[in-house]
Image: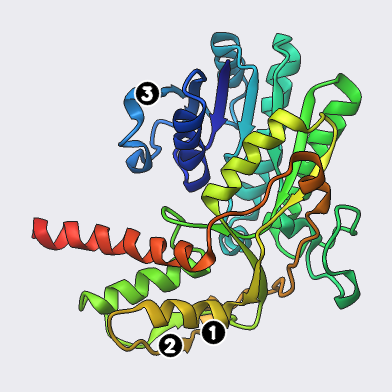
């Protein structure tokens, strides 16, 4: 089997490639990258995957890629994925996520390649839900609270429309917060972990800077998430949408306190107004029963292990830098 992973160089894409190599070694993995894509997350596996230069906003490049690879499955993970950045660059976010996804699906339509496509939407499409709406079901109304969330509504709906109109075999996920090593430092748990490690190494001083700590999130480990994505493609029919999420629900404040408790020195924190969003989503608790019933998937990795792995990821990075100096 041939699979194509868009966004293969990111946290999720690189972990997915590693999972496939370890658990499904007969699968041929192809990845979409841009010419300026950092490849640090692929160092350990780059000789075992085939990388192709293309761009989601360039339909011609996608047509060439699809014709060349002829994938049977596509994991469409590439996106402008930072909520905060989307407020500063809304047009870029919409172009990458909505137009980019449309181009990918159009490339399949125009080439006639019959691939099954996982389109990765987001729990952000639900926006600020009411207390009586948790746990959040797939039928919950959309109330997108950021340009990123709007872009994911568009991506979600264009995937469904191409299934209805053209028979493109899309299956959508609305993944709730998932994290782990390689998570970008624009996201809360990685931003906190990175700063804690910088205090440990004497690179910065207390206090670390944080944003809104009252938001409630349900966390999953990225390695559980990629296993879920594989099971999705194995067992779930095209045209459907599924919430996927972990089993640890807490405020960001509670998450921060766990990280601080793992630090090798005392850590203080300070809420920085610059890190507060113009509008925020503060209550995300998923109902994942539909996905679990379809696949039997359950998260396996304890959240404390996830947070320790994030800290160790940054410790290893700064340890290498200190030795290099």
For the N terminus, the image quarter is top right
Could you classify mark 1 by the number of other residues whose Cα lies within 10 Å: few (under 14), some (14-19), or many (20 or more)? few
- Image height of 52 relative to 156, above or below: above
Residue under numbered circle 1: 273
Could you classify mark 2 by the number of other residues whose Cα lies within 10 Å: few (under 14), some (14-19), or many (20 or more)? some
For the C terminus, the image quarter is bottom left
Q: Which numbered disc, 2 or 1, marks the residue closer to the eye?
A: 2
**Mark sitting earlier along the chain (1/3):** 3
Contact, CB < 8 Å: mark 2 with mark 1?
Answer: no
The residue positioned 32% from the left and 24% from the top of the image is 47
Contact, CB < 8 Å: mark 1 with mark 3?
Answer: no
Q: Secondary structure at mark 2?
A: strand
The residue positioned 78% from the left and 42% from the top of the image is 156
The image position of residue 88, as x and y in percent, is 58, 62
Q: Which numbered disc, 1 or 3, marks the residue closer to the eye?
A: 3
The residue positioned 60% from the left and 48% from the top of the image is 225
Which of the colour schemes (rainbow, by chain, secondary structure, one colour) is used?
rainbow
Question: Could you tell me how far apart the alpha carbons at marks 3 and 2 are, in whole angstroms?
Answer: 42 Å
The image position of residue 29, as x and y in percent, is 49, 23
The image position of residue 297, as x and y in percent, is 69, 46
The residue positioned 44% from the left and 39% from the top of the image is 9
Q: Which numbered disc, 3 or 2, marks the residue closer to the eye?
A: 3
The image position of residue 169, as x and y in percent, is 79, 24
Question: Could you tell me how far apart the alpha carbons at marks 2 and 1 are, in whole angstroms?
Answer: 13 Å
Could you classify mark 3 by the number of other residues whose Cα lies within 10 Å: few (under 14), some (14-19), or many (20 or more)? some
Indicate the quadrant where residue 217 lies: bottom right
Indicate the quadrant where residue 154 lies: top right
Q: In front: 146, or 75?
A: 75
Q: Secondary structure at mark 3?
A: helix
Residue under numbered circle 2: 269
Q: Which mark is residue 48?
A: 3
């Amino acid at each position: 089997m041939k699979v194509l992973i868009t966004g293969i160089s990111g946290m999720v894409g690189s972990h997915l490639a590693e999972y496939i190599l370890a658990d499904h070694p007969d699968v041929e993995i192809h990845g979409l990258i841009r010419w300026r894509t950092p490849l640090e997350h692929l160092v350990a596996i780059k000789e075992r995957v085939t990388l192709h230069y293309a761009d989601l906003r360039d339909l011609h490049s996608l047509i060439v890629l699809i014709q060349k690879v002829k994938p049977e499955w596509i994991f469409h993970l590439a996106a402008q994925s930072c909520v905060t950045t989307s407020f500063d660059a809304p047009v870029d976010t919409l172009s990458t996520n909505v137009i980019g996804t449309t181009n990918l699906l159009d490339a399949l339509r125009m080439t006639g390649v019959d691939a099954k496509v996982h389109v990765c939407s987001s729990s952000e499409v639900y926006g600020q839900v009411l207390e009586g709406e948790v746990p959040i079901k797939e039928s919950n109304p959309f109330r997108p609270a950021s340009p990123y969330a709007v872009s994911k509504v568009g991506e979600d709906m264009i995937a469904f429309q191409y299934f209805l109109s053209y028979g493109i075999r899309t299956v959508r996920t609305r993944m709730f917060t998932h994290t782990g090593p390689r998570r970008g430092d624009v996201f809360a748990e990685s931003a906190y972990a990175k700063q804690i490690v910088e205090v440990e190494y004497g690179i910065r001083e207390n206090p670390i800077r944080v944003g809104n700590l009252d938001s409630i999130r349900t966390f999953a480990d990225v390695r559980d998430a990629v296993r879920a994505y594989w099971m999705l493609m194995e067992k779930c029919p095209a045209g459907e949408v599924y919430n996927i999420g972990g089993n640890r629900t807490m405020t960001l404040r509670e998450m921060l306190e766990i990280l601080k408790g793992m630090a090798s020195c005392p850590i203080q924190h300070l809420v920085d107004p610059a890190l507060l969003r113009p509008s925020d989503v503060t209550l995300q608790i998923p109902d994942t029963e539909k996905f679990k019933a379809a696949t039997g998937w359950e998260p396996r990795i304890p959240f404390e292990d996830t947070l320790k792995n994030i800290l160790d990821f940054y410790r290893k990075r700064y340890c290498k830098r200190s030795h290099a100096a």
